[in-house]
Image (cartoon, rainbow, N blue to C red):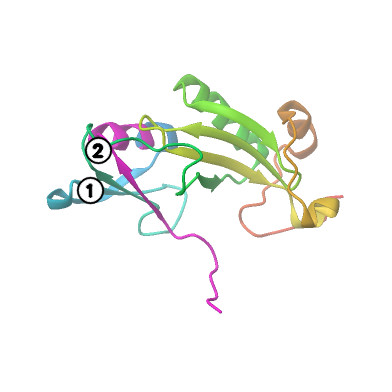
Amino acid sequence: MIAVRRLNHAVLFVGDLARAVRFYGEVFGFEVVAREPGADAAFLRSPFGDNHHDLGLFGVGPQAPGPERGRVGLYHLAWQVDTIDELATAREVLAAYGALRGESSHGATKSLYGADPDGNEFEVMWMLPRSAWGEFEHSAPVEPLDLGAELERWSGYSTAGGDDEDAT
């Protein structure tokens, strides 16, 4: 058994490296921490984490075919935010960039779905406190997200840090 703790970073092939760096910088606030010009690559870090890099981008040129939904390969990446309030902000940002593709409640998680300029899909999600999973402990429904109701119930409640106060 390999004792994985979490996903450390993701690497994507992109058609235009500069465009992708700009998108992830403006939408997520990612900062370029390293470049590898020989590979047409950039490595980006979230200003809210302590990782060396969270995302690697490798330019393959505009002639490369984009991802195709329903084919073998990566479906999407998921980034977690700390509060439901941050998820609401993410919805506004994604919508402003024309990148919002959908939203769902999966019981224990509340999710927004988007795509970058190359069509690489991603999820931005907030997780309920562990003590509130209840019936969702062993299920992951796909239901409409009522973000207003979730904000009323969970506004200001932090979950990404691992603390789980009594949430009932």
The x, y position of residue 105, in whole percent, is: 72, 37
**SS assignment at label 2:** helix
User: Hey, what amino acid is under mark 1?
Assistant: Ala
| Count of marks overlaid on the render | 2
Relative to 42, say whether 97 is above or below. above
- Residue matched to label 2: 17
- Identify the residue at the far left of this view: 38
The x, y position of residue 144, in whole percent, is: 73, 30
Q: Residue at x 41, y 47 (%)?
A: 47
Q: Residues within 10 Å of mark 2 (few under 14, many from 20)?
A: some
Q: Which residues are magenta?
A: 1-24
- The answer to whether residue 4 is left or right of residue 39 is right
Front position in the image: 104 or 53: 104
Front position in the image: 50 or 144: 144
Check contact, mark 1 vs mark 2: CB within 8 A: yes
- Residue matched to label 1: 41
Relative to 102, say whether 28 is above or below. below
The x, y position of residue 48, in whole percent, is: 47, 48
Let me know if residue 6 is in the magenta part.
Answer: yes
Q: Tell me which label, 1 or 2, sits earlier in the chain.
A: 2
Q: Residue at x 56, y 79 (%)?
A: 1
